[in-house]
Amino acid sequence: MIKAVWTDFGGVLTPPVSHTFAAFCAKTGLPAEPLLEAVFEVTARYGTDDIMLPLDTPLVTEEEWIRQVAEVLSAKLGTEVEMISFADTWFDGRETNHEWLAELYRLRERGLFVGMLSNMPPAWEGHWRRMVPPEGLFDDVVSSAQVGCRKPDREIFELAAARAGVRPEECVLVDDLEKNCAGATAAGWHAVHFTDTALAIERLAELLARGGPDGPAAESVGAPAGEAAA
């Protein structure tokens, strides 16, 4: 019996992160490949290859992270690079996935618990709330920066299920990262790997029909490998 639907933010309630990154580079005039190389170099300083982990745990402030990336990028380009607020530029003009947003409202109207479960840097808090006002939509929001753990670690799924007041097997995660879906299923949840809005709606409907409020327990639902996003 599925009682709680938890949605990711970036790449689910927004376009793919690759789309946002391309727009970021266009707005700032920064070259994509050297920028990514600089970001990965700074990321490695924190003992990970997950570029968002230092920011959304958080291990470093956005201001300090930007300074480090700018220093590395300047060295790569041979010229001084000035980077303004990452969050402000990243969210400037970022689109909301209104089709998925409407589906979440429909799920809540059906009586399901609807929450957002996201690896989110503290500096992004005001920005995502302007894009997707949580009032009247989310029964709860679990953000990595606020709770001190992150997807795909088991701890955050246990916390989210407890905050929803349901058992792990009564939760489903909709996420654009396969590793997060794998973390959810390892914690006893169901999961829908988000690669396309219409497909995600269809797969979630199938899952709820088989294991929804009036049906039997459902199997985890996945999709073909998709693009990694943060």
Image (cartoon, helix red, strand yellow):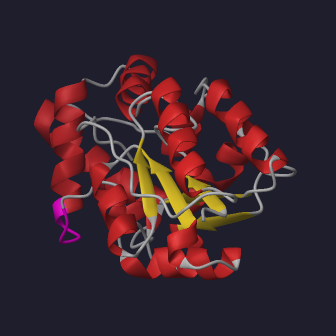
Q: How many marks?
A: 0
- Residue 181, position in %: x, y? 36, 57
Q: x%, y% of residue 208?
A: 58, 50
Q: Is residue 67 left or right of residue 149?
A: left
Task: Give the magenta-colored segment's residue range.
Answer: 44-48
Residue 85 image point, x, y percent: 52, 43
Q: Position of residue 87 (x, y in %)?
A: 54, 44
**What secondary structure is the stretch in magenta mostly built from?**
loop
Kindly identify the residue that appears in the image at 45 percent across and 68 percent down. 189
Q: Residue at x 62, y 82 (%)?
A: 162
Residue 112 lies left or right of residue 228; in this view the side is right
Q: Nearer the viewer, residue 201 or 115?
A: 201
Q: Residue furthest right?
A: 136
Which of the 4 image quadrants contains residue 214?
Answer: bottom right
As drawn, 203 above or below 3: above
Visible in this render: residue 22? Answer: yes
